[in-house]
Image (tube, rainbow, N blue to C red):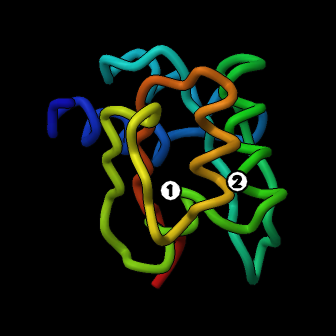
Amino acid sequence: MTGSGFVSAIASLQRAGIGDDLCGPFLSALPVTGVAISTLGDPLGSETVCASDAAAAELDEIQLDLGEGPCWEAMLTGVPVLEPNVQTATSPHWPMASRALRETGLGAVFAFPMRVGT
């Protein structure tokens, strides 16, 4: 993943309006096959905001339903979670999500914390 691709995607999001595709900039800018963006906890609640396809939506829902996974770890720690091989990974931070994500056949997952406001 290139830093400039991520920065480009963030810049696109800053210009986005209501109804714009929020996943598209990341899908275009980064070498990934799926993207999901979700809100976690207060003040917006926990839900999928957008997903680039059904597989990305399923992977996001697994994490939201279980209340654990790479997206939760990224939010809690404030640092990206980069797991290049979900099939062999064992995270002490998200044991149930690890098992559920492996069952989908997922290869890799990268979660980036993004904050709104201060």
> Mark 1 falls on what kind of element?
helix
Image quadrant containing the N terminus: top left
Tell which of 61 and 53 is nearer to you.
61
Image x and y of residue 92, in percent: 46, 69
Q: Which mark is residue 98?
A: none
Using the numbered discs, state the Cα–Cα distance from disc 1 to disc 2 in whole angstroms.
8 Å
With 41 as the anchor, is 12 left or right in this view? left
**20 w.r.t. 13: above or below:** above
Residue sitting at x 39%, y 37%: 88
With 11 as the anchor, is 2 left or right in this view? left
* Residue that lies at the very extreme toward the left in this rendered image: 3
Residue sitting at x 43%, y 29%: 26
With 113 as the anchor, is 18 left or right in this view? right
With 19 as the anchor, is 7 left or right in this view? left
Residue 105, quarter of the rendered image? top right
Tell which of 118 and 89 is nearer to you.
89
Tell which of 39 and 69 is nearer to you.
69
Residue neighbourhood size for the residue with mark 2, other residues' Cα within 10 Å, grouped as few (<14), some (14–19), many (≥20):
many
Image x and y of residue 23, in percent: 58, 30
**75 w.r.t. 49: above or below:** below
Residue sitting at x 69%, y 61%: 39
Residue sitting at x 78%, y 72%: 44
Would you name the residue on which mark 1 appears? 70
Number of on-image labels: 2
Residue neighbourhood size for the residue with mark 1, other residues' Cα within 10 Å, grouped as few (<14), some (14–19), many (≥20):
many
Image x and y of residue 97, in percent: 65, 53
> Mark 2 falls on what kind of element?
helix
Image x and y of residue 25, in percent: 46, 26
Would you name the residue on which mark 2 appears? 63
Q: Looking at the image, do the residues carrying marks 1 and 2 touch, with CB atoms under 8 Å apart?
A: yes
Three-letter code for the amino acid on which mark 2 is drawn: Gln
